Amino acid sequence: MSRDDEIRVVVADDQALLRGSFRVLVDSEPGLRVVGEARTGAEAVELARVRRPDVLLMDVRMPQTDGIEATRLIRSSPEGAGTRVLILTMFDLDEYVYDALRAGASGFLLKDTQPDELLRAIRVVAAGESLLAPSVTRRLIAEFAARPEPARVRTAELEGVTEREREVLLLIARGLSNSEIARRMCVSMATVKSHVGRLLAKLDARDRAQLVIVAYESALVAVEGVPLSRDRRRGPGRLPPPGR
């Protein structure tokens, strides 16, 4: 594989040991290469501008500019248009899940994720897909439900969406993959991909993660009866699994 075919990765974390571990792991995988390390959010933004990586592994809590603001700055700049941000955190109850996705993150993983899963996640987001683990989707639902302020109602955005597309959007918001949606709806993968593509176009969404946000903010999820827990003492494992 030539260097032109490699997936270029930047690692942003304020802990040198973790940055080094991620670098060794990524560089050991054929087709992946670390092209820079950042210890602050500001450094991550600058590296994204200069190196223009395909994927940026972003810690949430960093000095100076945090990972959420760094993600927002990267994704809103012309230089960062081609960089996909994969957020890494120590806890699946991280209170920043919702804000990270709104800022433009394409995925969210725990730092104790198995090495092969992290490498797969890098390839997934580099290919233009979003990656939301079921625990993260459940956390996002809980976060949305627990917010005291009224949700931003964006129902007008759904006016051009067909009933079948709404069904697909609801299942995406529940955290189901394309293959799971195909089985649930008894349709082919090609049909599901076609529905997802039309949803992205109609809702002016960059990726699957943004479709999830639209589903919450348009009240589609609540209307359709997805269980929303307001008890923050209940962890994600106690929330009903996606699709139940």
Image: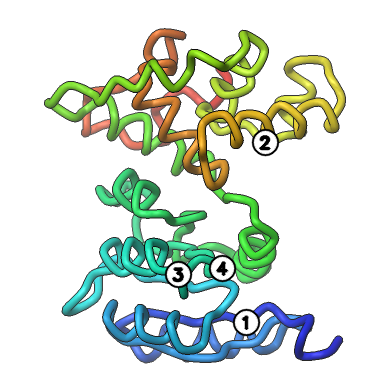
Give amino acid for label 1. Answer: Arg
Please identify, in this view, whether the residue under mark 4 or under mark 2 is nearer the observer: 4
- CA distance separating discs 3 and 1: 18 Å
Give amino acid for label 4. Answer: Gly
Give amino acid for label 3. Answer: Pro
Residue designated by label 1 = 8
Residue contact between numbered discs 1 and 4, judged by CB atoms under 8 Å: no
The answer to which of 90 and 50 lies nearer the viewer is 50
Q: Residues within 10 Å of mark 2 (few under 14, many from 20)?
A: some
The answer to which of 131 and 3 lies nearer the viewer is 3
Q: Element at badge 4?
A: loop
- CA distance separating discs 2 and 3: 30 Å
Vertical comparison of 54 with 24: above or below? above
Residue designated by label 3 = 78
Q: Residue furthest left?
A: 148
The quarter of the picture where residue 12 lies is: bottom left
Q: Residues within 10 Å of mark 1 (few under 14, many from 20)?
A: many
What colour-coding does the image apply? Answer: rainbow
- CA distance separating discs 1 and 2: 26 Å
Please identify, in this view, whether the residue under mark 1 or under mark 4 is nearer the observer: 4
- CA distance separating discs 4 and 3: 8 Å
Residue contact between numbered discs 3 and 1, judged by CB atoms under 8 Å: no
Which mark, by number, is residue 61? none
Residue designated by label 4 = 82
- Where residue 202 sits: x, y (%)? 57, 29
The quarter of the picture where residue 104 lies is: bottom left
The quarter of the picture where residue 143 lies is: top left
Task: Indicate which disc, 4 or 2, sits on the residue closer to the N terminus.
Answer: 4
Q: Quadrant of the C terminus?
A: top right
- CA distance separating discs 1 and 4: 11 Å
